[in-house]
Amino acid sequence: MIDPVLLRENPDRVRASQAARGSSVELVDQALAADSARRSAIGAFEELRAEQNTFGKSVAKAPKEEKAALVAQVQELAGRVKAAQQVANEAEAEFTRLAGSIENVILDGVPAGGEKDFTTLREVGEKPTFDFEPRDHLELGELLGAIDMTRGTKVSGSRFYFLRGIGARLEIALMNMALDRALEGGFVPLITPTLVKPEIMAGTGFLGEHSDEIYYLPADDLYLTGTSEVALAGYHSDEIIDVSENAARYAGWSTCYRREAGSYGKDTRGIIRVHQFNKLEMFVYTRPEDAEAEHLRLVGMQERMLQDLGLSYRVIDTAAGDLGSSAARKYDIEAWVPTQGAFRELTSTSNCTTYQARRLSTRYRDGSGKTAPVATLNGTLATTRWLVAILETHQQADGSVVIPEALRPYLGGLEVVRP
């Protein structure tokens, strides 16, 4: 949820953010009206409750013979207090609904617009060229006995697959390499639950307009997570944590599930867009004033991973309309996929400011000792999709693939994978 004080004191900034996202500007005015009604209802309730307390004390002091006559007044006042409390509760719920529908306020400099309106910040690495016709990652995966889509479809349906042999080893090696980097960066490793309660899923902002992309188990009232960000964001919900000296940094390793609703016909070949994959996700709780610096730190860790794997990539500043409701800024890193002649997203990292923490009631004590919402950030350090770029970038004419040097220690020193 956005900061109610910001909404009240600087509504134009919130309106501008909604407009840049292509979202409802009118919702801001509706939330402002609901905030006014909420505060008025709370004030009326508290005034009546104070009157009730004062009257109760006078009744207690009244002579015994007068108390009986005051009972009716006590009951009438109690009824009014109860009714006022009901009005206040309803007004609070309406404000929460409307304010909770406003997306996080974007940071200065975030490009306006939709998916194609990003700003390219830099391109790094030389795009690979070949003196032969390059194979795509699925053809390579099948030659190497690394990817089996046919049996994945047979067992589970479309967009499922088996990683086998060197494919399974490559993914585990990649994840272990990322885990080592996370440990060096001070992250605490966690293997997270992949089923979460509705309040945790809602708290991270994933139950908005894209809720149809999430698998839901109605018999258990639980959601399958599409990223360990969800469980990591819920890890400290309803807590006051200490981030006065250092940020709290976690690296969550989990299987992820996405329905990919609305993506039919897109990336149906291979393992670019699938229903199940593995991921190592970085998640940070920090003081709000440190969030932007922490964001750049996460991007730096991601870039070093891609550089050490010999991948050509670009970093983009994602446009407001493509951020998702929780992020105030998101940097995507896209690797060059030779057979597509295009950059494809491998990682993203988001600064969610205090938006998720307000919804999940995760706080810290500021310099004055008062509690305030923390800032949260998340970023992918490795995922199954990386195999696409690794296989295609490092392929050779005979269908073999050179293992990036940084990965070799995790594969027993293996230098080349051959059909």
Image (tube, helix red, strand yellow):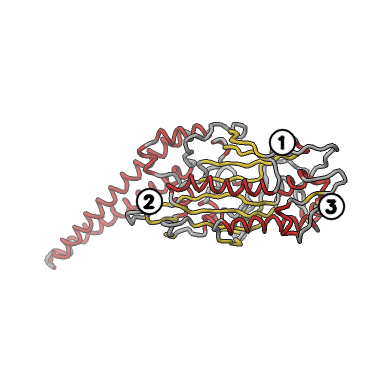
Residue labelled with disc 1: 342
| Location of residue 138 in the rendering, given as x and y in whole percent from the top left corner | 80, 46
* Amino acid type at mark 3: Leu
Label 3, label 1: how far apart the Cα atoms are: 24 Å
Q: Which mark sits nearer the N-terminus, 2 or 1?
A: 2
The answer to whether residue 221 is seen in the rendering is no
Dot 1 crowding, Cα within 10 Å, few <14, some 14–19, many 20+: few
Foreground label between 2 and 3: 3
Q: Residue 31 placed where, x, y %?
A: 41, 40
Q: Where is mark 3, residue-wise?
A: 144
Who is closer to the viewer here, 181 or 209? 181
| Dot 2 or dot 3, earlier in sequence | 2
Task: Report the amino acid beneath label 2.
Answer: Asn
| Left or right of residue 270, residue 63 in this image | left
Q: Amino acid at mark 1?
A: Ala
| Between 109 and 233, the one nearer to me in the picture | 109
Identity of the residue furthest to the bottom in this view: 64
Please indicate whether residue 186 sits to the left or right of residue 64 in the image: right
Within-10-Å neighbours for mark 3: few <14, some 14–19, many 20+: some
Q: Is residue 401 left or right of residue 335?
A: right
**Label 3: which secondary element:** loop
**Position in image of residue 8 (x %, y %):** 36, 39
* Number of numbered labels in the structure image: 3
Q: Give percent across and percent down for residue 403.
A: 77, 52
